[in-house]
Amino acid sequence: MRDHFTLKRLLLGFAVLALLSLGLFAQEYRLFERAWFNLQQSGKSLAAERDILLSGYQVEIEAKVIEGLDDDVSALTYDPDRNSLFTVTNQKAQLIELSLDGELLRRIDLHGFGDAEAVEYISKGLYVISDERRQRLIKVWVDDSTTELHADQAQQFSLSIGRNGNKGFEGLAYDSAGQRLFVAKERDPMRIYEIHGFPQRDPQQPFAVHVVDDQQRDAGLFVRDLSSLQFDERSGHLLALSDESRLVLELNVEGKPISSLSLLSGRNGLKRSVPQGEGIAMDNQGVLYLVSEPNLFYRFKKPGA
């Protein structure tokens, strides 16, 4: 009888420990918030006309290897003037131009950019590249003849907020109408900063930078990290890519998640899960592009669009 009682206590102890471990796991991966969000989405019958509605996208090009690259790519941005995509590599630092089909078009060597982690199109010929470890934002000009760029010859801005090794600036997005540069800090803490005044378009104006940190908004993001950002000019909504959560979130103008795109196998037409999403971009037609380590290219589109 005593052995039976002891066995029951052991089993009960193991059950409690398992439940605690499951609860901690769910909390760490924000599973409760994600489940509640999915439940809310399933109950929605109407959406605003301007919403992107990520759940309606299907993969069109899946895990295409970007030929001709030895280093892993990071980040992605769409250039409407060239109708092409740009990404960066950070081992042998280069700015890489890709076609909308994921073909390598050209390389531009980067000198003195440190740990180049993100790139964002601002206006014709003008880009910002981030140095993750040193939290620098570097303004560069690119044209058809550009073969190399030197950081010491460019305007720079250092933020240095919550510096934490290689968990720094992972993503950039730009709102051209509001002239806001969104900067994603990967994690510890995870943040989306809004920077006004950089890059400076008019050199005749005084250099004045204002940084907005909305911690309440960021606390509502039920993802474990941030890898990349994309601002949609038509809706005014922000897309946030999370590598560890394998998810893309659509944030409305209040910064609240309103739709999501799962990067897991079996979802949105994917045969396999996206291994490590590093960059996301959207073109003028609403087509989504994504790059993932090791040098994989994806394209998502709404059927019939």
Image: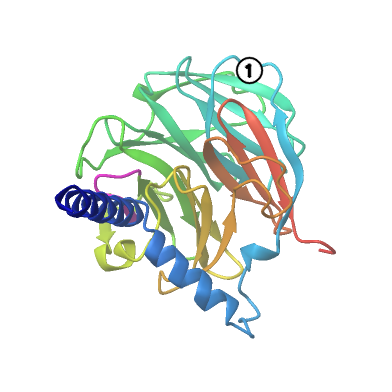
**Residue 247 falls inside the magenta stretch:** no
Q: Which color scheme did the rendering employ for the protein? A: rainbow
Q: Quadrant of residue 146?
A: top right
Position in image of residue 122 (x %, y %): 52, 48
The residue that disc 1 covers is: 69
**Residue 188 falls inside the magenta stretch:** yes
Residue located 63% across and 68% down the image:
53
Label 1 crowd bin: few (<14), some (14–19), many (20+), radius 10 Å: some
**Nearest to the observer: residue 7 or residue 183:** 7
Query: Which region of the structure is painted magenta?
Result: 186-194
Most extreme residue toward the right, as rendered? 304
Q: Does residue 29 sit above or below 32 in this rendering?
A: above
Type of the residue with mark 1: Leu
> Which image quarter is the N terminus in?
bottom left
Q: Does residue 117 sit above or below 15 in this rendering?
A: above
Position in image of residue 232 (x %, y %): 57, 61
Q: Is residue 196 visible?
A: no
Residue located 67% across and 40% down the image:
272
Position in image of residue 173 (x %, y %): 47, 51
Q: Is residue 118 visible?
A: yes
**Nearest to the observer: residue 28 or residue 179:** 28
Most extreme residue toward the bottom, as rendered? 45
